[in-house]
Amino acid sequence: MQFGYLAKESLRVNAATRKTLFRALVVFDCALAVIYFLGRDAEEGFISFAAPYILLFAGIVTVATVVRLITTSRPAMNGENLILPYDEHTREDVARHIDWEARGDKIVLTPSFLLLCSKKVTAIPQDKIYWICAQEGRKGGPFIVRLLVFAVGETFNLEGVDIERAKHVADMLYRHIPNVFSCFNPFRLSYLLEELFDKYPKDFVAYHKYYRTNWFRDYTLCNNLTQQSDSLTEPREIDFYIYFKEESDMDSVAEKLTEQGFTVASREKRETGVYGLSLTLEMAPELNNINRVTSGILRVLEDCEASFDGWGCPVSRPN
């Protein structure tokens, strides 16, 4: 009989469970043998008193073990081993979908779901995911590497994963959803966002939306260029525009961004009292590259009252 991915995954888990049960049963039998031999030297009254309870306990353990062995002898069918955090589909529908799309692994990315496979399979719809990363454990912590997933309403994690595999899955996922935190160090950011998500989930959503809005602005501008036959691969001078309420903030930001390779094109005070800063940077405006740059600007602007007004550049067409 041909089994789908989820059924095969349940067979793998069941095999590991049966192995654990057999080991536990051996340890239990050894313990009973020790109690028996030690009890032989005890008073006869104690043996006659304890024997029924020991036999009862042994019977319960044996029955429970047999029942568990029977239940783990068959594969989970129709998505019985699925955990669906979002009740938008039935287990049967999701199981059919996953069996069609998935290829075996502890972490599986299908066109529709991210699957985390442990004792059961957690199926997270891609459109519910904010951000994922391979979170390397801190020295002395409880894990070495885990895949950390920030999704609508809760976080998910899978410990003991291979870091290169986790990074690969993250890169593959970001072909379908924007990596809005691409400019950050994922090791440090993962712990900060995990704490923010747990304590202040609304603030996390707002923070994600702030960077997501910036990503969509970059996407729109890049799309406008490609519609004019621009391949986005040719380096050129790109202009960035920022507005401030305070001149001191403008000077501080100009200094920080200059250290990062930007060139100040102009500074001006407008009639409205707002200070404008224009900077240039030579680069190719490919989406991932430009988004890292603009997200880096947003990070610098987090400490002051400022508004990033986007970027612009000339169209570069092939000769």
Image (cartoon, rainbow, N blue to C red):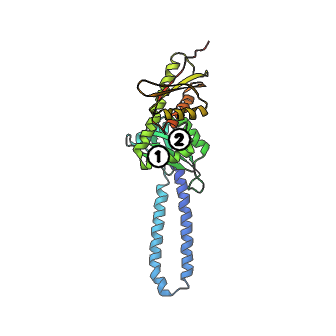
Q: Earlier in the sequence, mark 1 or mark 2?
A: 2
Q: Amino acid at mark 2?
A: Val
Can residue 32 be seen in this snapshot? yes
Determine whether the residue tagged by mark 1 lies in a helix, strand or loop: strand
Kindly give the residue lying farthest to the top in the view shown: 319
Q: Is residue 156 above or below residue 61?
A: above
Residue at x 46%, y 70% (from the top left corner): 59
Q: In the drawing, what numbered circle is on residue 78? A: none
Residue picked out by circle 2 = 108
Q: Is residue 57 above or below residue 213?
A: below
| Figure disc tally | 2
Q: In the drawing, what numbered circle is on residue 122? A: 1
Determine whether the residue tagged by mark 2 lies in a helix, strand or loop: strand
Residue at x 52%, y 36% (from the top left corner): 300
Query: Residue 121, image x and y in percent?
Result: 48, 47
Query: Residue 10, image x and y in percent?
Result: 50, 49
